[in-house]
Amino acid sequence: MARGRQLAVVTNGERAMVVLTDTDGSPWEHLVDPHADSSSGRYPLSNGQIDTYADRDTVTFDLACRAVAHFITHATWPADVSIEDDRSS
């Protein structure tokens, strides 16, 4: 059995949901845009479903790319991103 965490990114080309989970799929945390107040659609999932997410739960595509690259290199998020802890949800 794999140990550690899994990083998932779902994007519609403009915004992205970036989620970190335990390998068992338990929630861990995700990037948020605390100033966003609308929603965006066209997020294709692997099962063919197309989702819509609150923009607060997504970030711009450019920020997602930069944050993921930083996380892969440093095992921590960059200081300028906002994170929501999903473990207590």
Image: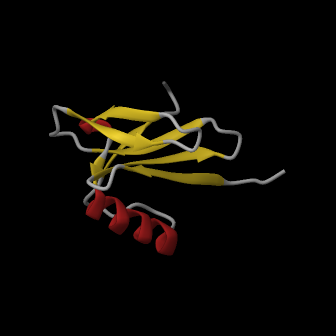
Count all numbered tags in the image, as a single digit: 0
| Residue depicted at x 63% and y 52% | 5
Q: Residue furthest bottom?
A: 73
Whether residue 34 sits left or right of residue 44 in the image: it is left
Q: Position of residue 75 (x, y in %)?
A: 51, 66
Whether residue 17 sits left or right of residue 8 in the image: it is left
Q: Position of residue 36 (x, y in %)?
A: 17, 38
Quarter occupied by residue 48: top right
Q: Residue furthest top?
A: 89
Give the vertical position of 67 relative to 23 (above or below): below
Give the vertical position of 7 relative to 49 (above or below): below
| Residue depicted at x 71% and y 40% | 24
Quarter occupied by residue 40: top left
Q: Position of residue 4 (x, y in %)?
A: 68, 54
| Residue depicted at x 57% and y 44% | 46
58 vs 14, nearest the viewer: 14
42 vs 18, nearest the viewer: 42
Q: Position of residue 52 (x, y in %)?
A: 34, 32
Give the vertical position of 53 relative to 66 (above or below): above
Q: Residue furthest right?
A: 1
Tell me how the rendering is colored. secondary structure
Whether residue 48 sits left or right of residue 39 in the image: it is right
